[in-house]
Amino acid sequence: MAITLSERAADHIRNFLTRRGKGLGIRLGVKTSGCSGMAYKLEFVDVAHDDDLTFESFGVTVFTDAKSLAYLDGTELDYAKEGLNEGFKFNNPNVKNECGCGESFHV
Amino acid sequence: MTLDFKQDFFALFGQPRRFGLDAAALDAAYRAIAAEVHPDRYASAPDSERRLALMHATRVNEGYQTLRQPLARARYLLQLAGIDTQEETNTSMPAEFLMEQMEWREAIADARAGSHVEQLEKLARELAGDLKSLEAELAEALDSADPDLDGAAQLVRKWRFMEKLDQEIGDAIEALLY
Amino acid sequence: MALLQIAEPGLSTAPHQHRLAVGIDLGTTNSLVATVRSGSATCLPDEFGRSLLPSVVHYSKAGTVVGHNAQAEQSHDPHNTIVSVKRFMGRGLADLPDAGSLPYHFVDAPGMLQLSTRAGAKSPVEVSADILRTLKERAEASLGGELTGAVITVPAYFDDAQRQATKDAARLAGLNVLRLLNEPTAAAIAYGLDNASEGTYVVYDLGGGTFDVSILKLSRGVFEVLATSGDSALGGDDFDHRIYCWMLSEAGLSGLGAHNTRLLLTRAREAKEALTEHTETRITAILSDGESIDLTLDQATFHEITKTLVDKTLLPVRKALRDAKISVDDVKGVVMVGGATRMPQVQKAVGELFGQPPLTNLDPDKVVALGAAMQANVLAGNKGDDDWLLLDVIPLSLGLETMGGLVEKVIPRNSTIPTARAQEFTTFKDGQTAMAIHVLQGERELVADCRSLARFVLHGIPPMVAGAARIRVTFQVDADGLLSVTAREQSSGVEAHIEVKPSYGLSDDEISRMLTESLSHVKEDIEARKLREAIVDAESLLEATRSALASDGDLLDAAERADIDAALAVADAAIKGDSTRAVNDAAAALSRLTDPFAERRMNRNIQRALKGHNISEL
């Protein structure tokens, strides 16, 4: 089981972590809410939790928890530009349908 | 434990009610409380909380300004003790003090007429020294076991005279520079 | 498909609930918008990758154009191309010494002047709103959603009228103003946080049309402004003007029309910029009558003709040092802000005054917008525990007119905001039943030398003998540096209150009318928008109340708790419906019920802060 980053996403995360001046890596997770039942969580990590699962991808440590991993296994986090907008995008193979907003999904 | 608006400024910052003050402790207490009540902490809060924060922050700033300046602090202590400092009404001063005032005024006028900015800055430093001794006298009058409140009120009135001198020096420097 | 940003630990928001906040530097020459994305402050560029939006608006029958495209119209349609509108904010025609040499048709409306354009008379507030709207649209396209709020920067030396006009412009552009922030303070945030600085710093901010200097003490996350000074009518534009005058005298020209004036001013600006890197520059132009100009300006001449301008900036610097009661030796660093600080003679003069080279490691054009974005991020609630505190001041004293045309100061300059001060006055005639109150801003003693902010009358004073009435006038300055004044007769309780809308400020009604008009352009359903706004406000109130109940619910007794729970349920139901009225009523009811709770929570926080501090002191 794994979560990966695209090389482009990893470059941006490393850059953001450097400019932020602290942080162990990033946390990917899911929480129940949103228009399609589940929502993604994407945060910096300053303190690791005991039950964290971690993955390394292009030199960036990715943190998650067992419950979230069940929904995120096989996900690749990418960085994309759409017009003036830019940011991270979850390519999650578990998703059956999304609400079209990219922020919440249903399995 | 309500922070009601009747609480005095010393209690607000958790400082003993006396003239001699630990400036670093006051600064630290002010910053800690300001950090809690500053309107920036409530920028996205509902209207009622924003209004409350504005009120509290205003009071905390007023309290800090009052306590950190010796003149304002002395006046405030006297006011708490029910003494009117009569700064506007009572202008009777010892003759010696009035003589000194005249000498100061002459020195300022001379320096100004001669466009001596350095001279004015020197006078400002001397005046700051005199204010330091006045501060020590105030501490003695207010903080002793048997405080001399009327004497302290007289010192406050003296300070007001000196403050006006400082203002005059500042105005003279500005007039020469601009 | 929204693209996600990395949130601070524990601060992920629910889907569609992002708190999108921006900082806007509304400059005389250029404007910028910035935001904090995945923890980093960044300026948002347009589709061509340009961050700077020229603060230029062109009005024509075909519509309104802002920025680079408007700039292109400058030479051939100068009357309808508004540049440097910031200089007109909150100003009347009498305030402009050079109105005659500007290519505009001014209309002297009561208070603030207006500009007559092909699209009708425009107030500087409306022109600024057009610039802000362009930046808002850019930000929303870049962030993929509606903005929650914005921090707008203003020169620290802006008076109340200029600040109020700026806030009105932002509201007119449909922005929720989280805070007006002083430009040097914004720069200090961006600079201080990047460099983890501690100590006393001077921010020297020479923009296109304004000059500010602020002295700040930075320590452990607190930015305390000790003093601020400046000149709200001095900037890079004046250097252009000196070159322009030099060109006229060298080429023996006079009485140029608007078109040629604009052309030569543009050439002057290009020459100024060229002289930053080159020791001389050639200036060529062909005037509308076919006459050609070909001049060479060298650095030495440029420095000579602008020396008085550079010297003029050093006076407020000295004044601020005196107000802060520090000497140049106490200054740890001098931060340079504003495009005009690129001029070598400016850097040299500042370096000589402070005996150290000024700090120029941040882009002087962007640093204000970046700092504003960082503050907006904090105010919107996107930052964790390690945020900072700004203690800013008012730049100019506030006072009241007293007998004989004199001004009595009520709040002295450099007072930390928010602040309030009350002064008591009395009647001077037997049976006097009204008292006129005239609010002024400035340092001078005579009313005529200060800026008049507002006049109002307290009516209904019960007739008494002269000197018996006690009228208490209270000045309150909020965290935006904006003043409101209340007058109250103590024995009868008769009261009058005004938000100090400068005599010429727009009333709230005027703003909502203008907002409605501008919205109808985009054919937006206003009712739907009102409902959506009401729901968003109510949701944030519900969220705040729930989180307060979770952390401090013990401060309530069972009955109070039950009342609040009931009001929460009503509000919850209302936001699922479609009645704006019901949402607003439910929110107001909840807000009233939670007022005492909020008070108790704030007291608890203060006690905690004090305790935490005492423990750490021991």
Image (cartoon, coloured by chain):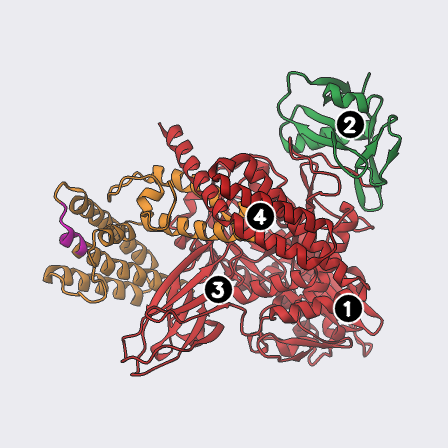
| Of the pair C534 and C556, the residue shown nearer to us | C556
| Main secondary structure along the magenta-highlighted residues | helix
Q: Residue at x 35, y 65 (%)?
A: C423
Q: Do the dots labelled 3 and 2 sit on one chain? A: no
Under tag 3, what secondary structure?
strand
As drawn, the chain in red is: C
Identity, as a three-letter code, of the amino acid under mark 2: Ala
Image hue for chain A? green
Q: How many neighbours does mark 2 have within 10 angstroms: few (below 14), some (14-19), or many (20 or more)?
A: many
Tag 4 residue: B45
| Of the pair C344 and C161, the residue shown nearer to us | C161
Instruction: Give the spatial CA distance, label 3 vs label 1.
Output: 35 Å
| Chain letter of the residue carrying label 4 | B
**Tag 3 near tag 4, CB within 8 Å:** no
User: Which x, y percent locates residue A101?
Assistant: 82, 41
Verify whether residue B152 appears in magenta. Answer: yes
| Of the pair A62 and C361, the residue shown nearer to us | A62
Verify whether residue B126 appears in magenta. Answer: no
User: Which residues make up the magenta segment?
Assistant: B147-153
Tag 1 residue: C58
Identity, as a three-letter code, of the amino acid under mark 4: Ala
Tag 3 residue: C484
| Chain letter of the residue carrying label 2 | A
User: Which x, y percent locates residue B97?
Assistant: 14, 59
| Of the pair A69 and C403, the residue shown nearer to us | A69
Q: Is residue C478 above or below residue C390?
A: below
Tag 2 residue: A10
Q: Earlier in the sequence, mark 3 or mark 1?
A: 1
